[in-house]
Structures are given as C-alpha cells and as structure tokens.
Image (cartoon, rainbow, N blue to C red):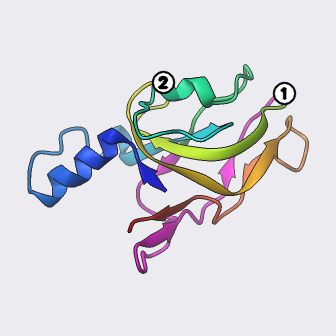
Amino acid sequence: MAMGAWGANMVAKFLTNQSTTGWPPTGNQMWLALCTSAPDSSMTGTTLDAIEPTAASYARVSIPISGNWSTPSSGITQYNGTVNLSPSENWGLVTHWALCTTQTAGEMVVFGTLTSAINILAAGSALTQIPPGYIRLIVG
C-alpha cells in the first residue's frame, strides 16, 4: 500500500495536530476504485479514471471507514468484508486498487496491489466479488 499525495498530507496534518478538513470523507466511507494497472502517488481521484475499467457498468464501490477492518497489528490491517460488484459486462483483469474520497473524481487516499489479480466477469459468473482480505493496508 502507498499513499496518494492527498492522503500523505492528511497523515502529516493529523500527526502535527493541524486541521484535517476533508477527513473523514462524507458519510464516513471511502470509495474503492479498481485499477487495471498500478496507480502512482501523484494521481487524484480524477486522474485515476484513466486506469479504471472502461466498461459502462463499472462504478466505484462504497467501503465503510469503520467496521469490517481487522484490528491493526504491526501497521497492517485488511478489509474483511466482501466487496460486491455489479458488472453487466466483463470489466477485465484488475490488479490494483485505490481508496478515494468520492464515487467520482475526489482525492485518492491510498492505493495498493490486490492480493491476487481478479478477472471481473459479467453478472451471473462466479467472479463478481472481491473476497475478504484482498485489500490490505500496510503502514510502515
């Protein structure tokens, strides 16, 4: 896992007791973006669009900030909820993820590599979910 520039600034502000306007995001949720290649720290929620699936039914999925996350240990936590997707056509192979502040555009907070690449197929197939544990946050 790595931080986007916006996420890194939020952590620096938090650690130095400065205003963290914009955190937590509206509704205490982040939005999971799936990526077909690796994001980089200079990307925002808007520029991330270039590496998200292009299928018409693709949309970022809401992930709650609290609940379903494992208790951090040695700087590692993982999302233990199942992420249900709604593809009406194939989205293709996704290899990376990012958590953003909004469903479209917004800021990219953190990003990383999926535990295993997943080929997202149309609804009715077995691969319309991201299993628990595939999204891990490692700080350190």
Q: Given the image, on which type of amino acid does mark 1 rest? A: Glu
The kind of secondary structure element at disc 1 is loop
Task: Tell me where residue 106 appears, x and y as whole percent.
Answer: 39, 28
What residue lies at 46% left-to-right and 23% top-to-bottom?
A: 46
Q: Count of labels shown?
A: 2
What residue lies at 44% left-to-right and 32% top-to-bottom?
A: 43
Residue 25 visible within the image = no
The part of the chain drawn in magenta is: 63-89
What residue lies at 36% left-to-right and 47% top-to-bottom?
A: 28
Mark earlier in primary sequence (2, 1): 2
Q: Nearer the viewer, mark 2 or mark 1?
A: 2
Q: Is residue 73 magenta?
A: yes
Task: Tell me where residue 6 appears, x and y as whole percent.
Answer: 31, 39
Residue located beneath label 1 in the image:
89
Q: Which mark is residue 39?
A: none
Callout 1 crowding tier (Cα within 10 Å): few <14, some 14–19, many ≥20: some
Residue located beneath label 2 in the image:
47
